Image (spheres, rainbow, N blue to C red):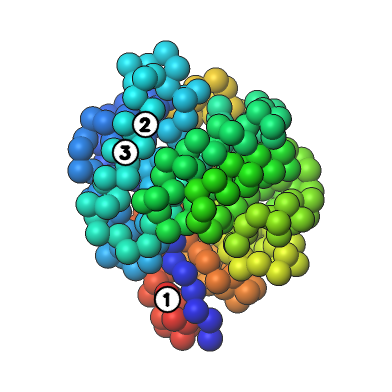
Amino acid sequence: MSKVILLDGGMGQELVARAKGTPTALWSTQVMIDNPGMVADVHRDFATAGATVATTNTYAIHRDRLVGTPWEDRFKDLHTMALAEVRASGASVIAGAIGPLYASYRPDLHPDADTAAPIYAEIAQMIGPSCDLILCESVASVTHAEAVLRGAAAAGKPVWLALTVKDDDGTKLRSGEDLADVLPIAQAGASAVLLNCSVPEAIPAGLKILAQSGLAYGAYANAFETITAGFLVDKPTVDALTTRADMTPSAYAAHALAWVEQGATIVGGCCEVSPAHIAEIANQLRAAGHQIV
């Protein structure tokens, strides 16, 4: 049986659900500002469920996201706030999240690698000392992968590259490029390669490709029906997305166990994957004889 690293679930959606307010374009960042201690509570709940890695609430903290808000000049303060929350939770392994510039699932907006790499490097240098690894999330194109890996290297910590693929074709990045085209870039700059924030059904085809990398690999999917056109506008809010009623903890965990059977050694959840989902993955992993590490 396998040794499996169990990631946490969807911090942003969990925060939005707990805050019970109207979602804003600042998403989980605004919830963290308005509700001190809530992020630490979510980290603790995922750990209690069985997660062995805590992912920082820094995915959406980018200078471009803060333009026009009262927090435009508080970029560093917000990262400090997120890092304080994860430390307060008592997490033993911390993954420093770096999300995409400008918007998720919008590779058409992403700058060229020479422009973007220093922007990512600023974040990596800021959060690196407080993290055990850097997790580059929702990477949607080859250019995005090159840029974020170059930037993340500035942290001096191991880097995991998490790629988002088309919901109807797990062999294609959101950009339409072949997932396989990222492998040489990943091999040069990452210690693990993952699939994230795509529907669970798209994951198996992508894992077959990641298995060719020679790196540790895995997946953490979302539980949305699909990424809608309404979410692909400027400054979207998460209420443009619909949760899948069929993606119960048991159903999601069954997908995760299938990924492990494919050779994945890192699994977890993305948007709409709650502590209950992570707890069920942990239960099913142990029942199948796997060791969570």
As drawn, the label of residue 80 is 3
Taking depth in this image into account, of 239 and 68 the one nearest to the observer is 68
* Residue at position x 31%, y 31% in the image: 77
Is the C terminus in the top left, top right, bottom left or bottom right quadrant?
bottom left
- Who comes first in sequence, dot 1 or dot 3? 3
Mark 1 surroundings: few (<14), some (14-19) or many (≥20) residues within 10 A: some
Q: Percent x, y for residue 122?
A: 50, 35
Q: Percent x, y for residue 225?
A: 54, 44
- Who comes first in sequence, dot 1 or dot 2? 2
Mark 2 surroundings: few (<14), some (14-19) or many (≥20) residues within 10 A: some
Q: Which residue is mark 2?
A: 76
As drawn, the label of residue 40 is none
Quadrant in the rendering for residue 284: bottom left
Q: Amino acid at mark 1?
A: Ile
- Tell me: residue 120, above or below residue 205: above
Q: Amino acid at mark 3?
A: Thr
Q: Distance between the Cα atoms at labels 1 and 2?
A: 34 Å
Can residue 153 be seen here? The reply is yes
